[in-house]
Each structure stands twice: as structure tokens, then as C-alpha cells.
Amino acid sequence: MTIRRVPTDFRVDEIATAAFRESIRPAADARTLHAIYRLEKTSLTTPEATARLAKSLALRAGEVVHAGLKDKHAFTTQHVSAKTRDPAAADRFAPEITAPGLRATLLGWSDAPIDASIIESNHFEIVVRALTRESSTRMSRHAAALTLPSGIVPTPLLIPHSPRPPAATSLLVTNYFGEQRFGSARHAQGLAAAHLVRAEFEPALRLLIATPARKDTGARRAFTRAAATHWGHWSNLLAATEPCSLRHPIERLAAGGTFIDAFAALPMIDQRLCVDAYQSWLWNHAASDLVRESFAADPGATLDIATDHGPLVFVRADAVPTHLADLIAPLPRKGAPLEGGWSRAIENVLAREGLALDQLEIPSLRRPRFDQGERPLFVRAMNFTLSAPAPDEFAKGRLARTACFDLPSGSYATVVLRALGQ
């Protein structure tokens, strides 16, 4: 059935660190030239919202800086900063700005632009709709299995201090990357970077710009459909499409360039995202392998959830040993410092891909590169509550429940919902 939703069904509130909140000053001076706004947005990506705010402030789009990306299909609040030229020009930074889909409230002034370090956590309130009695019961059963035993305190490394009093309930969840990370996986035809590491630039480019996807909109939708029709006939494709950033690779090809040249002509954000997607996909599969292998002798301890991008394996919280609960797992890349079970899991996933660790780079190009980061294998969803089931106002005969919880920056609320069987 079609599930009706409203933007407020998915609410995200970015919680800033106490140090950042205390650093904000009430007025601009020679040192504090960065206006700090609290941005509320609905049905906009963070870049779309910051571009609209910049226009309202008579700034260029890139002059409004965000700390983190927030979901488009949600009601979200987050922090952004905008720099004034001098204290005298600060008067044009209005205390409140409204534009379609957003409202920004001036909190004060800072001596530096914001970045991800100011985010302590994100608070989520999510309404899950169209539940049957069976699926509602499954949510309760999964929540009970994932609940940390009372008295266990999360380590500071995995969950930052919350400004609100901690609730009694915290869930322990395998810290997978969310499925929204895999936007470059087109209709189950694979991830572009899986071709890039093999120097297969044409199929990679074709996946990225000539494979239509259901969620494409606007200029991207028009271009991917034209590219699928005219692939290989570059002049015809240029004649059939309007100017946009996706045309740059085709212009290179029409001028006699190689597919390497064409890929390098993509906007760097598109190049970066496709590499991040593949690296995250590899990490997720290694995490599933490691968790499943670790509990092979106790299969009743695991909860397996099938997704379009591979299985997600969660674990009954009281069964997770400390060495796994506290494991920090490096992202797969050439030269990554892998050890023990995590090393075996990465090697196994790469073997299924027909690759080795030292192949995780793009031949002939200096960038984009596979990230050097690392990620906790497990994350605590703090202050977790799950409302009692109630009739869904949009789905006759079905139920709705609201899940509330806090996650550190970089962890995904959609993964928590998957862990709850949704």
C-alpha cells in the first residue's frame, strides 16, 4: 500500500556542543564576524536551503556554511554561519529570515565559521506509519532485544554527552551507513566506483549520468534520460540537452577526450560521492560478515534485515562482548591499518568483489581518494522511547508509533529503524 507521510513525520534537531553554545556572542565586532543562524527547513536539502539563505543575505551560495547535511524529506533544524565583511555591515543580517521552505533565526556571532566539530548529536522524532499489529509487535520485540541492560554506561568515545537528562533506555545498534549513502547505485546495476578501481571509466560514467533512476528530478531527470538514448552520439546528446554540470563530461568526449577526461570533468562533489558510496558499501558488508561470524555459535542472538544494498545484521544487546562493542573499524582503503577479525572481514568482502586492498584507488587520477577515516562498529541510540501503537490517521485499520532517540553525528536514524524491523 502507498504510505502517506508529512514532513513532520521525520524530525531532526541538531544539538550543538556546550563549548560552541557558550562561544556565541550577542554582537559582531572586529573578531566575531560570523553570524550563527539556527536554520529550520522542510523538503529542502541542506545545500538548497543554505543557497536560499545566502540569497536573502545578498551573499554567494558558498558563503553560508553548514555543520552537517540534513535529510531533505524531513523537518530539520541545524546550525549555519555566514560571514560579514566588517561589524558595520552586520546590521543587514536580520534577526529572522523566512524563505520558501525555511526559517533562520540569528543566535549571535562567532569568531570562526562552523564545521562538523560543533555537532554533539542529533535528536530524532520519527513517526512510523501504516503498521500492522504484527509489524508493531515486531518493533517492540526488536527494541527489547537491542536495549542495553540497565547500568551499562556508553563509552564517551561512541556517544557524546547529551544536554538533556539521559533516559533509562539506550539501544545498541550495528553502526551501518544508511541506504541514502548509496545514491550512485542505479537500479541495482552496481556502484560506479566498483568500475573506477578497475579503470573501467565508461561504465562508471554511464552509471552516473546515463542511467535513469526513479528519484531523479528536474535537470538531472531530463539529462539522464537523454544520455541513455543518445549514448555514444555525443553531438546529438549535446543538442538534446540544456546546459548543466552533467554535460561537461559529454563536452569533453565530443571534443575527442577520453572517458578518464570525461569522468574528471564531473563536479568534484559527484566524484567524491560515488567513491564514498562504494567505500561505505564495502564497510557495511564487512560489518555484516564480522557480526555474523562472531555469533555463528549463537544464531539466536542476531537479527537479520534484508535491504536492496545487502543484509544488515543486528545483535541482541546483552550478547555483545566489550571488544566488539568498543571496536573502531577503519574504512577500507589502500594501506588501511586492518587487524584481526576486521581485517578478515574486509579481505573476504573484497575477495567476493575480485579485488585486494591495494586496488582501492582510482588509476590515472589523484582524486577522489578513498577516505582515511574510521567508524565505530556499534553505536548507542540514546534516550530511546517508543510510543504505544495508535490508529494511523492516514491509513485505515493500520497503526502508527513514534520513535525518539539521539545519535552522534555520522550515524543514521534510518539504520535504527531497520534494526527495529522497519
Image (cartoon, helix red, strand yellow):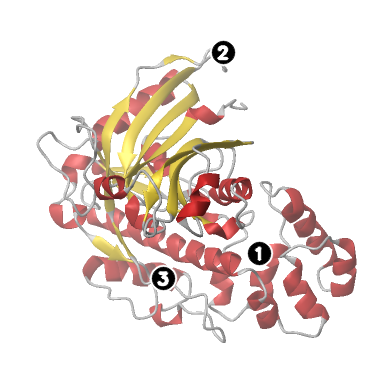
Quarter of the picture containing the N terminus is top right
Decide if residue 397 is in sight here: yes
Q: Tag 1, which secondary structure? A: helix
Residue 2: which quarter of the image? top right
Return the residue at label 3. Answer: 371
Residue type at mark 2 is: Lys
**Which mark, residue 359?**
none
Where residue 37 appears, as percent x and y from the top left, is: 45, 44
Q: Tag 2, which secondary structure? A: loop
Q: Residue at x 59, y 25 (%)?
A: 4
Q: CA distance from mark 3 to mark 2?
A: 47 Å
Return the residue at label 2. Answer: 396
Q: Nearer the viewer, residue 371 or 197?
A: 371
Quarter of the picture containing the C terminus is top left
Q: Residue at x 38, y 46 (%)?
A: 27
Residue 247: which quarter of the image? bottom right
Q: Nearer the viewer, residue 310 or 196?
A: 196
Q: Tag 3, which secondary structure? A: loop
Label 3 or label 2, whichever comes before in sequence order? 3
401 relative position to 271: left or right: left
Residue extending furthest front?
Answer: 88
125 relative position to 184: left or right: left
Residue type at mark 1 is: Leu
Where residue 75 appears, as percent x and y from the top left, is: 50, 34
64 relative position to 375: left or right: right
